[in-house]
Amino acid sequence: MHFTKMQGLGNDYLYFYGEAPGDAAGLSRRLSDRHFGPGADGLIFIAPAQDADFSMRIFNADGSEARMCGNGIRCVGKYVYDKGHTHKRELVIATGAGPRRLRLACEGGKVVSVAVDMGRALVRSGTDGDFVDMGNPHLVHFVPDAEAAPLLTEGPRLSGSVPDGVNVEFVSQLGPACLRMRVWERGSGVTLACGTGACAAAAAAVRRGLCPPEQPIELRLDGGVLRVTVSAEGQVEMEGPAETVYEGEVEG
């Protein structure tokens, strides 16, 4: 099985072209192991689709299937363009959370960054923070200093407080349109970045009046920077880099 390891702000996945096999969950657990496998936050399978340009299926490092991944879908755009599966620079990708539109920015014939129409954020305030539906569930917890957030203790506790788990973001405000975010992802644990989490954090900040709508908000994550724009109606667009790490072969 040929794979391409790719990353968006350090959120890394192994990408396969073709339908996900029946043992995709077990395969993800084995290959995502950073000591006994190539190591990744999970696997992503890309295939042609009838009602979209391509489809993607995401399996976390623990074998669970995710509906959507913001960093992962940017790398999908780079994968299909760089490898010649498409020459289009505007694509529709079918995901478990519904179709998502991509705009590819290229230099020297290769994709360097991708803007994604992430759909509408649904924000609901709760006792532990703001619950945000970005196609997958998030709990955005605003704190004075995200650098000092108890990620390894409160992350899994808050994630497990919701049936089926939730992604947990610890967010602090650095400026009128600048947020610092760290994340605990259900199924993967601490990751360097989470695209849907960044969108959730920006949407919650706009809802609280911390950041302005209709303007790019800079999200500083452990792995780098994403730019997220939230409309007054809650529509979200995310833009950030996508990079190829290496190609490899594994036994199925």
Image (spheres, rainbow, N blue to C red):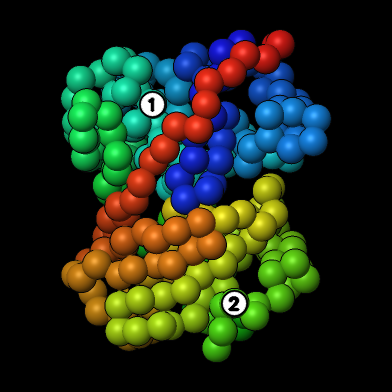
Left or right, 52 with reference to 128: left
x and y percentages locating residue 88 in the rendered image: 19, 25
Q: Earlier in the sequence, mark 1 or mark 2?
A: 1
At horizontal 30% and vertical 84% (from top left) the residue drawn is 176
Instruction: Name the spot of residue 6 as percent of width and height, x first.
Output: 49, 34
Give the quarter of the image for residue 14.
top right
Q: Could you tell me which quadrant the N terminus lies in?
A: top right
- 160 left or right of 249? right
Residue 230: where, in percent of width, then height?
27, 66
**In the rendered image, the vertical position of residue 187 relative to residue 150, given as above or below:** above
187 to the left or right of 2: right
Q: Nearer the viewer, residue 38 or 207?
A: 38
Looking at this view, name the residue that lies furthest to the right: 36
> Mark 2: which amino acid?
Glu
Secondary structure type for disc 2: helix
Q: How many marks?
A: 2
Foreground pick, 244 / 175: 244
Per the image, label 1 sits on a secondary structure element best described as helix
Q: On the rendered image, what quadrant is the C terminus found in?
A: top right
> In the rendered image, is residue 234 in sight?
no
What distance separates the C-alpha of mark 1 from that of mark 2? Answer: 33 Å
Q: Is residue 54 visible?
A: yes
Above or below, 164 against 124 in this view is above
From what the image shows, is residue 48 above or below residue 136?
above
Please tell me which residue is depicted at 49% across the width and 40% down the height of the picture: 7
In the figure, residue 41 lies in which quadrant?
A: top right
Residue labelled with disc 2: 147
Say which mark, if any, is on residue 79. 1
The residue positioned 62% from the left and 14% from the top of the image is 249
- Residue with the most extreme bottom position: 144
